[in-house]
Amino acid sequence: MGQHEHHAVAPRTVTVAVVTLSDSRSPANDRTGDTIVALLEAAGHSVAGRELVREDPPAIRAVLEAALAGPAQAVILNGGTGIAPRDSTPEIVTPLLERELPGFGELFRQLSFQEIGAAAMLSRALAGVAHGKLLFALPGSETACRLALEQLILPELGHLVGELRKG
């Protein structure tokens, strides 16, 4: 089956949970989370829930486990993927992954490089499958999240969920 056939049988609507990891944002000023939700909804997907959690590993784990146990078919995290001492998202996410999608991080950094140059190497964005659901860990930057959604996630989200449904 070719790409067009895969997309033709893929779900058109995916339910997604959105989690912002930040010590400085609040629900009132989480523009990155707002952008992610707006892009998902504009593409016809539904948002099952939205959380904002401080950058504390036990708190992140708890919110992530709850999101993975909920009705969402995919979870998008934003924040904590850099190299600062408080950036622990990859260390929390990686042990949960049943399968990693290394191409996601590679492509994201390649696209980022085209926009911001060598600073793209600081991103540890990643994606994979956890608890049978898609899991994306994106930077906290609104611009970076827009890039990831528009160029990588939204074009393939239904296809990816369709692949996970195969028996």
Image (cartoon, helix red, strand yellow):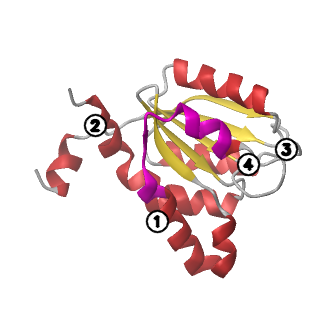
Asked if the residues shown at circle 3 and circle 1 are in contact, with their CB atoms under 8 angstroms apart, the answer is no
Q: Is residue 94 magenta?
A: yes
C-alpha distance separating marks 2 and 1: 21 Å
Task: List the single residue furthest toward the left.
Answer: 1
Type of residue at label 3? Arg
| Earlier sequence position, callout 2 versus callout 3 | 3
Q: Nearer the viewer, mark 2 or mark 1?
A: 1
Tell me the residue that label 1 is attached to. Answer: 107
Q: Earlier in the sequence, mark 1 or mark 4?
A: 4
Instruction: Say what secondary structure mark 1 lies in.
Output: helix
Marks 3 and 4 sit apart, C-alpha to C-alpha, by 13 Å
Q: Residues within 10 Å of mark 1 (few under 14, many from 20)?
A: some
In the rendering, at what x and y percent does residue 88 appear?
74, 44
* Marks 3/1: CA–CA distance: 28 Å
- Cα separation, mark 4 vs mark 2, equals 29 Å
Local secondary structure at mark 2 = helix
Real-space CA distance between mark 2 and mark 3, rounded to the nearest whole angstrom: 34 Å
Q: Which residue in the structure is indicated by mark 4?
A: 80
Q: Position of residue 28 (x, y in %)?
A: 83, 40
Bounds of the magenta span?
90-104
The answer to whether residue 159 is above or below residue 155 is: above
Is 121 magenta? The answer is no
Residue marked by disc 3 = 25
* Residue named by callout 2: 162
Residue 125 x, y percent position in the rendering: 59, 55
Between 135 and 88, the one lying in front of the other is: 88
Q: Amino acid at mark 1?
A: Leu
The crowd level at tag 2 (other Cα within 10 Å; few <14, some 14-19, many 20+) is: some
| Image quadrant occupied by the C terminus | top left
